[in-house]
Amino acid sequence: MALHFGKREFEQPRPMNSGMATPRHGQSAAVTPPPITPPAAEPEPTPAATTTNTTTPEGGSKLTVGPNIKLKGVEITDCDTLVVEGTVEATMDSRVIQIAEQGAFKGSAEIDIAEIRGSFEGNLNVRQKLVIHATGRVTGHVRYGRLVIEEGGQIAGEIACGPGAAGAKAHPPKSVALAA
């Protein structure tokens, strides 16, 4: 049983003045107090009301750099998901990066999955899937396993398909500038 402001949860507050006239001297009043009922149990959350983040495994670590926040000169490791809504200048080896529309990342990143809605500038090695949304811009040395570019998304620089050195030998990097 939880306590809230010094009262037990199942107790209902009693009114100070019920709005009825107070009996005068010599008169009796038959007032029955309201019945005390235990509170109803809280309903279990329905699956539709439960939100889960599919990119972050349960118990995984997630770092969010919020709007108007600048994170500079750091090395980010052992982070399952980095969400960039502000500005980050860093070196990163992680699982997932998500750059929001107003977000910007400058530096080097070794990532499994990258979703870019803002801007990325630097060395980007995506081991699995790189998604550049319509508002996204990626510039620099880019290597990816699979690539998805929405109409309006931009990619420029030295771009190679296939992560790692083996992919670079099989498909030599070409300097290109694409705008979907």
Image: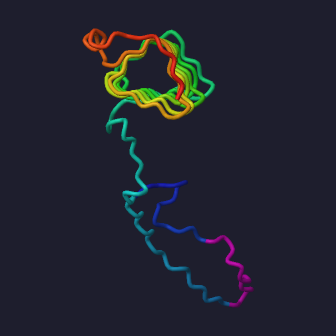
Magenta segment: does it hold 18?
Answer: yes
Q: What residue is at 51 percent from the left and 55 percent from the top?
A: 4
Quadrant location of the N terminus in the rendered image: bottom left
Q: Write down the region rendered in magenta.
A: 15-27
Residue 154 vs residue 52: left or right?
right
Residue 174 higher or lower than 114, as above or below: above
* Helix, strand or loop: magenta stretch: loop
List x then y, in percent, for residue 57.
32, 36
Q: Residue 45's quadrant in the figure?
A: bottom left
Color encoding of the figure: rainbow
Residue 133 higher or lower than 41, as above or below: above
Q: What residue is at 54 percent from the left and 80 percent from the top?
A: 34
Q: What residue is at 53 percent from the left and 69 percent from the top?
A: 12
Name, please, the residue furthest toward the left.
166
Nearest the viewer among 108 and 130 is: 130
List x then y, in percent, for residue 55.
37, 36
